[in-house]
Image: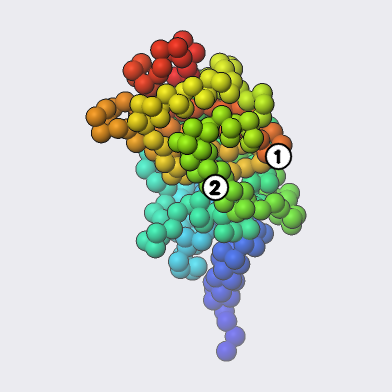
Amino acid sequence: MMLDMTDARRQDEVELVQAAQAGVVAAVSLLLERHWAGMRAVALSILGPGPDVDDVMQEAALVALRRITDVRDPQAVGPWLRMIVRNRCRGLLREARRLEPVADVPLPGTGGDLSAVLERQALGDWVWEAIEALSPALRLPLVLRHFTDGVMAYESIARVCGVPVGTVRSRLSQARAKLVAALDATAADAHSDSRSRTAAGWEAARATLAAAESGEFGKILRQDWSPEVALLSADVPVGGAALLVRAMDGDLEAGVRQRPVNVVAGRSVAVWEMDLINPADDPDHCPPSVAWIMGLEDGRVARLRLFHPRPLPASAIPPDLQDVWPQ
């Protein structure tokens, strides 16, 4: 018996989802094109006409790219895409009221996480190649917004970049528009291996911390980082390798340890998100976490920004560094 048009379309959609989950990048574009009108209708119903609708649609497209492997029922991909839009709209409204954001789409109950989903797919290589084509001013906010866990809020990105929140929103809008265009233009191209870069990033983070605890942080900086590495406060250099070594040694002497919890690894920007573990006798010495946000040149760290969700207390900064340490 021949399938009717409804059954044929449903079967075609199942095959598109399966292809997308296997890493066929063009399949994701086709799915988004097919459901774009319905997704946009959801955004308009919640936000009303205006530029926020375009921003939400661009963000939803990126979320779909990153999380397509979360779809368990390929026949339900349409409702899944509309749910992404709905949650992005609600998140935007929450942020406007300065409340804490929540996750866009629940992760699978099998212990998967976004970075693992991204790493094991050809989609990840495709997305990262397009990200690298952006200008540095657009690339950094996009990476922080979509790939980190602790630096994704607009206010946090503004602190890292040293610009107003309105500028962050503008840059993100420009970055997403350019990224979507670049993804469309490069769907059939070969892409670099983001999975290998991420694995190397985890190894480097752990090796760097182990070296620091052995008193060899300076050696790691000389070997693996740029000789002209600069610590930045926003975009302003405040010191180099010597300052970083003094600060790391000061933390270790105070009994503070770091544990990597998330690694973002591109060719030109990398982020190590760390838990900070304070000594038992001084549990409030440092905030609970820090992000190392690194600009890379020829694979070596040339610029470092340190982002704490809360400013460091004065007691956590060695006296000789308090006038220069970024906050």
Mark sitting on residue 299? none
Would you call the spot at circle 2 few (<14 residues within 10 Å), some (14-19), or many (20 or more)?
A: few
Q: Which residue is mark 1?
A: 133
Quadrant of the rendering where the C terminus is positioned? top left
Give the amino acid type for the residue marked by disc 1 in the picture: Ala
Q: Which residue is mark 2?
A: 203
Q: Looking at the picture, how far across and down is residue 208, in whole percent?
A: 52, 38
Would you call the spot at circle 1 few (<14 residues within 10 Å), some (14-19), or many (20 or more)?
A: few
Q: Looking at the picture, how far across and down is residue 209, in whole percent?
A: 48, 38
- Whether residue 204 is visible here, answered yes or no, is yes
Q: Secondary structure at mark 2?
A: helix
**Scheme by which the image is coloured:** rainbow
- Whether residue 145 is visible here, answered yes or no, is no
Q: Is residue 128 above or below residue 248?
A: below
Q: Earlier in the sequence, mark 1 or mark 2?
A: 1
Q: CA distance from mark 1 to mark 2?
A: 26 Å
Please give left or right for residue 259 compared with residue 116 in the image.
left
Give me the residue at 52% from left, 24% from top: 244
Q: Quadrant of residue 139?
A: top right
Residue furthest out toward the left: 281
Residue in front for this viewpoint, 188 or 297: 297
Give me the residue at 66% from left, 23% from top: 228
Give the amino acid type for the residue marked by disc 2 in the picture: Glu
Q: Secondary structure at mark 1?
A: loop
Q: Looking at the picture, how far across and down is residue 144, in whole percent?
A: 52, 36
Give me the residue at 49% from left, 32% from top: 215
Residue in front for this viewpoint, 268 or 145: 268
Nearer to us: label 1 or label 2: 2
Q: Looking at the picture, how far across and down is residue 93, in whole percent?
A: 39, 35
Give me the residue at 53% from left, 20% from top: 243
Quadrant of the rendering where the N terminus is positioned? bottom right
